[in-house]
């Protein structure tokens, strides 16, 4: 229930905080881009709200009302959203919370990250190496086939003639055995060559797929808290944030806290993730509406 501005001032003046003590100059981040600084024993007249559980909840009311000052009495759980031209006074136990600007975190580009051109060059190099291995494999196979043909020719020659021919045949048979051994070895080498070629082709395919994936902008689960949102839902977790975006025809992407600590809020955007100005905040991730 709301009470008059004058009554709110008297309520703050009459109570001393029995709960959280005010720390002069303490800064608390309520949500990304909204930080307040505590000043103790002061208040500003405005609109009063009862049963407000914490300093942070009071400051969130101030943020949502687009006001720069809120006053909170923890003992009575009363929050006064200060008027921009409201009168100010002193009150023991009151915490005067004023919105302050925090410098934006500078995003430093990684100087060691590979460029798309470097990744593509490495892929082409592996592709060329696979081609060389295939060419060598074919050369080895041709040599093995040639050796087999010559082996058969020598066997035919050794099979004709007299005793010397038989002697020569025995020698040729021995040579044939060695020839077959060599042929088996050559065939094994050819099979290994084919196995290596298959492995190289598989690596090339994966490389090309990785390159294609790396060339596309990420849109799902990006570590990002984009700026220029059109709506913010306080205290909303990521699952409910997704449902809210899906139910809103204007919403094309959303950002929310993926953990359980820090600011628990939901931000809605009328642009897809890749078109939203980049920014980050601890635990915040951004998804396109089309993400599974």
Image (cartoon, grey):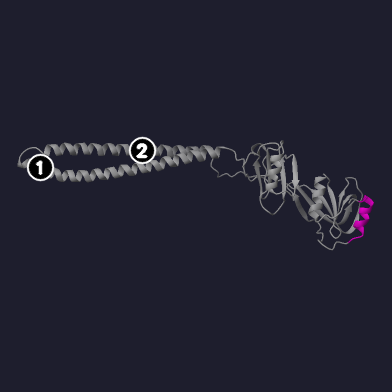
Residue placed under numbered mark 2 in the picture: 134
x 19%, y 37%: residue: 150
Disc assigned to residue 201: none
Work out whether mark 2 precedes mark 1 in sequence or the reverse, and give the earlier one: 2
x 42%, y 39%: residue: 201
Q: Between residues 272 and 35, which one lies in front from this camera angle?
A: 272
- What percent of the width, then of the height, locates residue 168? 10, 42
Q: Between residues 235 and 276, which one lies in front from this camera angle?
A: 235
Distance between the alpha carbons at the discs numbered 2 and 1: 39 Å
Quick check: is 72 in the magenta stretch? no
- What percent of the width, then of the height, locates residue 192? 33, 44
Q: Secondary structure at mark 1?
A: helix
Left or right of residue 130: residue 253 = right
Residue placed under numbered mark 1 in the picture: 168
Q: Secondary structure at mark 2?
A: helix
Classify the position of the C terminus by image quarter: top right
- Magenta residues (range): 3-15
């Amino acid at each position: 229930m709301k009470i008059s501005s004058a009554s709110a001032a008297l309520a703050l003046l009459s109570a001393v905080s029995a709960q959280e003590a005010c720390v002069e100059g303490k800064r608390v981040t309520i949500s990304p881009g909204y930080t307040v600084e505590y000043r103790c024993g002061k208040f500003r007249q405005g609109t009063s709200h009862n049963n407000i559980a914490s300093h942070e909840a009071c400051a969130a009311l101030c943020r949502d009302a687009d006001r720069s000052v809120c006053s909170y009495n923890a003992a009575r759980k009363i929050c006064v959203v200060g008027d921009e031209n409201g009168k100010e006074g002193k009150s023991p136990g009151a915490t005067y919370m004023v919105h302050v600007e925090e410098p934006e975190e500078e995003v430093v580009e990684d100087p060691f990250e590979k460029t798309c051109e470097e990744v593509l060059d490495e892929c082409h190099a592996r592709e060329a190496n696979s081609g060389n291995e295939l060419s060598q494999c074919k050369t080895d196979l041709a040599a093995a086939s040639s050796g087999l043909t010559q082996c058969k020719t020598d066997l035919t020659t050794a099979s004709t003639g007299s005793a010397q021919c038989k002697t020569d045949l025995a020698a040729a048979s021995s040579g044939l055995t060695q020839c077959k051994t060599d042929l088996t070895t050559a065939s094994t080498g050819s099979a290994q060559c084919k196995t290596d070629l298959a492995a190289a082709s598989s690596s090339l395919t994966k490389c090309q797929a990785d390159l294609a994936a790396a060339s596309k902008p990420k849109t799902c689960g990006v570590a990002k808290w984009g700026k220029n949102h059109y709506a913010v839902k306080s205290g909303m977790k990521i699952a409910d944030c997704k449902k809210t975006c899906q139910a809103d025809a204007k919403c094309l992407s959303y950002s929310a806290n993926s953990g359980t600590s820090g600011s628990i809020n939901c931000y809605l955007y009328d642009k897809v993730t890749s078109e939203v100005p980049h920014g980050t905040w601890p635990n915040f991730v951004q998804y396109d509406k089309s993400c599974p």
